[in-house]
Image: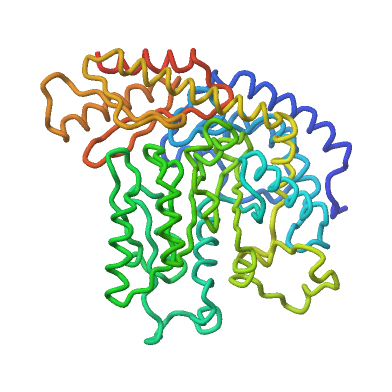
Amino acid sequence: MKTTSDLAPEEFARHAHRLADWIAAYLRDVERYPVLATTVPGAIRAQLPTAPPAAAESLDDILADLDRVVLPGATHWNHPGFLAYFANTASVPGILGELVTAALNLNAMLWRTSPVATELEQVVTDWLRQLFGMGDGWFGMITDTASISTMYALAAARERDPALGIRQRGMAGRADLPRLRVYCSEHAHSSVDKAAMTLGLGLENVVHIACDGDFRMRPDMLTRAILADRAQGFRPMAVVATAGTTSMTSVDPIADIGAICQRESLWLHVDGAYGGSAMAVPEMRPMFAGLELADSLVVNPHKWLFTPMDCSVLFTRQPKVLRRAFSLVPEYLTTPDGDQVVNYMDYGLQLGRRFRALKLWMVVRAFGTDGIADRIRHHCQLAQHFADWVRVEGKGWQVCAPVPFSTICFRHVPEGETDEREIAEHNEGIMARVNASGEIFISHTKLGDQYVLRVAIGNLRTTEATLDRAWALLRGAVR
């Protein structure tokens, strides 16, 4: 007899208890695994059948493959030695939240499709607003990543002047529509360029502004670029300021940029995907002075607020403009709730929306605002310790950028070496030897023509002992 229903709840309970023990053991013993996956391309696929099974397989067999297939092919972002890119944490409360989210299987598109999903999202995004010390008047919504949040912000900026008629008429083949320009730092994230590609603005219309010696956008150069574009008949549309650039975590002068945007009637979007979480630490908020002048802001809780992937929060002070950019309600989605409720589907491209608010709500409750601030503060202190080790060591070791948060850019220059290509190859070799250890995973970037190494601290399991080991491996890789 064919089975046409789900597996029994009792079956779930038995395997869920087993899986809970597996996850607990993984989190406790994650250092047993090499942080960077050592598999070769195609090796995982080669272990697996090329066709799906016709007959049902047991959950016992499926869960056994977590150890056989999944773990050997994983780069372990929850490993304390993960110091590459922007380290993150899938924390215990966040993991529990994901479990419940999967079980409830809610769709947060309309208020009535799950009132709790909408209202919890409203509550938890306002909690973040308060956690960050932001004033009233901000509307928050959860997306998947900062790339999508930034695209939404620039879509709203494009819609700010409805006289352009882009919502109805589009942009193609229109002689009456000037070229719309977006401005950002030369060190801004590539998501700004991708948003311009997606929105039909074009890469040529993203103007990358030169930075000062601390890698911050120069307001005088921004003003010069805007005036030059207006003189050529272009239409300046928006500026993206960065609070924690991807390579070196510099913070653009938001107040000065905001004043320019107000004078020139431009939308100001602030990319705080990584650095914005530092606003949870009261003494660090002065770095974000001028944020009240912004029209939108993105912060990623899945980076430095210990929430499992994926969870990005877009704030805006112009929710009506954002809604105008995206709202389109077919008859089958009309409801009698009217203006009494928020329907989040009206503020973005997605119709189906995951219940991401639950895991974020659980993380904030489990750690508290003081606990979140203490953890971020501790990571910044660890970064300063590491930077001090590099400075004190000398012998060719250099800190190459300011350390405002928890990321350090540094390199080693052999005595007497001045050729940047040789220095780059030398540091690339250091990185390869450190990463081959399996204990530590670091990444690199370029600051101008300098190839530098990066250590990014953001995992709750990273300790001073972790960094001490990383530093020992780095020095050993030179020798």
Q: Quadrant of residue 14?
A: top right
Which residue is nearer to you in this view: 9 or 391?
A: 391
Residue at screen point 84% across, 45% down: 7
The figure's colour scheme reads rainbow
Query: What is the total number of numbered labels drawn onto the structure image?
Result: 0
Res 172 seen here: yes
Q: Nearer the viewer, residue 42 or 142?
A: 142
Q: Position of residue 337 (x, y in %)?
A: 84, 69
Q: Is residue 261 above or below residue 435?
A: below
Residue 355 percent coordinates (x, y): 73, 50
Q: Is 63 drawn above or below residue 352 in the view shown?
A: above
Residue 72 appearing in the image:
no
- 285 or 463: nearer the viewer: 285
Q: Is residue 407 above or below residue 146?
A: above
Which residue lies at the image location 29% right of the left edge and 30% below the top edge?
A: 400
Residue 413, horizontal then vertical, whole percent: 20, 23
Q: Give coordinates of residue 83: x percent, y percent.
A: 45, 28
With 284 as the anchor, is 256 left or right in this view?
A: left
Residue 444 image-quadrant placement:
top left
Q: Residue at x 37, y 87 (%)?
A: 175
Q: Quadrant of residue 331?
A: bottom right
Q: Residue at x 39, y 85 (%)?
A: 173
Q: Quadrant of the C terminus?
A: top left
In this image, 393 relative to 140: left or right? left
